[in-house]
């Protein structure tokens, strides 16, 4: 059973930085897209950033210019560099790998908590 494992979350002061990482626990066919989502208490899960195999990216408006998503295709890892963090960035962050045909899948991690507070 493949699992995605996130790391790098924690407590940081406003204006600070964190770098999240995510990798698959087992061997998988390369994902077409890798993404980060987040969910704050009482809110729906939302897309933060997504990156394709070719490196195309898209970001939520709220994080543009502050967050950067990147991936290592050889290792099937995805990263999220978060700078200039704000209290409203506090949430559980989840990684997501999606592959279409052949050998399609849609994997989710269990999440890592990010708290931005003074």
Image (cartoon, helix red, strand yellow):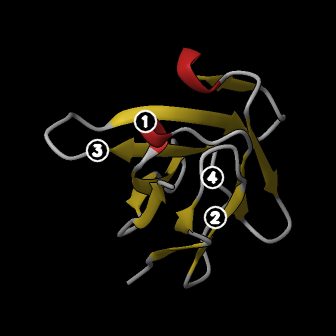
Above or below 94: residue 65: above
Contact between marks 2 and 4 (CB within 8 A): the answer is yes
* Residue 22 in picture, x, y percent from top left: 61, 67
Residue bearing the label numbered 2:
29
Residue 20: image quadrant is bottom right
N-terminal of the pair, mark 2 or mark 3, is: 2
SS category of the residue bearing label 4: loop
Q: Is residue 58 left or right of residue 56?
A: left
Query: Which residue is at 41% across, 60% downward?
Result: 107
SS category of the residue bearing label 2: loop
Contact between marks 2 and 3 (CB within 8 A): the answer is no
Residue bearing the label numbered 1:
88
Q: CA distance from mark 3 to mark 4?
A: 26 Å
Contact between marks 4 and 1 (CB within 8 A): the answer is no
Contact between marks 1 and 3 (CB within 8 A): the answer is yes
Q: Nearer the viewer, residue 18 or 59?
A: 18
Q: Quadrant of the N terminus?
A: bottom left
Q: Nearer the viewer, residue 95 or 3?
A: 95
N-terminal of the pair, mark 4 or mark 1, is: 4
């Amino acid at each position: 059973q493949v699992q995605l494992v996130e790391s790098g979350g924690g407590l940081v002061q406003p204006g600070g930085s964190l770098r999240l990482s995510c990798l698959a626990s087992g061997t998988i066919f390369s994902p077409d897209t890798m993404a980060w989502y987040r969910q704050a208490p009482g809110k729906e899960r939302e897309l933060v950033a997504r990156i394709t195999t070719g490196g195309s990216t898209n970001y939520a408006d709220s994080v543009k210019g502050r967050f950067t998503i990147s991936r290592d295709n050889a290792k099937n890892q995805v990263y999220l560099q978060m700078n200039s963090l704000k209290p409203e960035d506090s949430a559980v962050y989840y990684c997501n790998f999606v592959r279409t045909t052949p050998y399609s899948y849609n994997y989710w991690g269990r999440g890592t908590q990010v708290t931005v507070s003074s």
